[in-house]
Amino acid sequence: MCTAANIPLSKTDCPAVRKFFQQHVVNGLAIPKRAQLTEKHMAEVYSEGVCVLKEKLAGKPVAIIFDETPDPQGRCVLNILVAPLRVDEDGNLRAFLVDTVLLNTAHHRSVSQSVVKVLQQYDISNENVIVINTDNAAYMLKAYKECLSVLYPNAIHITCVAHIMSLVGESYRKPFTGLNNFIRSFSAIFFRAGARHRLLQVGPITQRRHLLVHVGSLRQRHQLNHSHKKSRVCRLSRQQLPQCG
């Protein structure tokens, strides 16, 4: 239920959730917590999901979509999606995330091996791979040209339109070297500022707290200065300014 509803299993450990189970669900405290759900039940649910997905993909022409991106720890993460090229019961074409692979390096061989392994795991025949969709990175192009195009002869390679538009924009910007140098130098003034580096030496949560404290102190100092100046102006207007009549 939690996985189908996209509810994190860790929510079952929340004290408010446990209290709700105890008060409103018969034998609610017997509902397992995250550790038990992960260790004993998650593997079974995953296997059932793989079987259901195999049935949806069986014998259908498919498109393979994969892209690599770094995670917060700086690791290379390859996401692989498979989209059957036939509409479902609702008349839609849906793509399914079939695997997420941690790569040691973003290389055309490692990418090709991961894709081939996943397609074999889901019993997708080579002839049914009709589309391979990637970005325009050099190792992605090489993965298709040297490996995947040989294994999947019916497939055509489609590259990301957004990435193409980005490259086109870069080509328009490239001749304006003077403007590019000015923008780069102007950005470096803020990027290399000493105050910014001191803030970045702490964690993001601590950094936000420090910023809030700093902004609060500046606001308080501004209010004090403003009230002090206002009182001085009032005293001057009473004591030093000439009065008419």
Image (tube, helix red, strand yellow):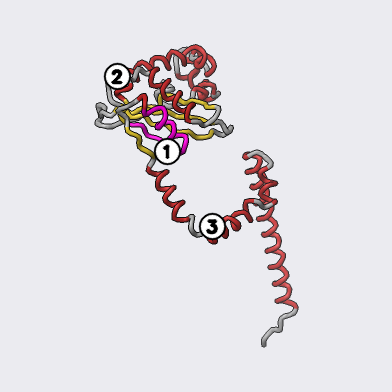
Is 64 on the left or on the right of 201, as rendered? left
Question: Can residue 42 be seen from the camera position used here?
Answer: yes
What numbered label is drawn on residue 71?
none
Quote the CA–CA distance across marks 2 and 1. 27 Å
Is 46 on the left or on the right of 34, as rendered? left
Taking the spot 45% from the left edge, 52% from the top edge, the residue there is 171
Quadrant location of the N terminus in the rendered image? top left
Identify which residue, 181 or 79, lies in the foreground.
Answer: 181
Residue that carries the numbered disc 1 in the rendered image = 135
Q: What's the magenta region? A: 131-149
The numbered mark, 3 or 2, whose residue comes first in the sequence reads 2
Q: Amino acid at mark 1?
A: Asp
Taking the spot 48% from the left edge, 27% from the top edge, the residue there is 109
Taking the spot 33% from the left edge, 22% from the top edge, the residue there is 126
Whether residues under marks 3 and 1 lie with C-beta atoms below 8 angstroms apart, the answer is no
Q: Residue furthest bottom?
A: 245
Image location (x, y in percent) of residue 68 = 48, 33
Mark 2 closeness class: few <14, some 14–19, many ≥20 residues within 10 Å: some
Image quarter for residue 144? Answer: top left
Residue that carries the numbered disc 2 in the rendered image = 58
Q: Residue furthest right?
A: 239
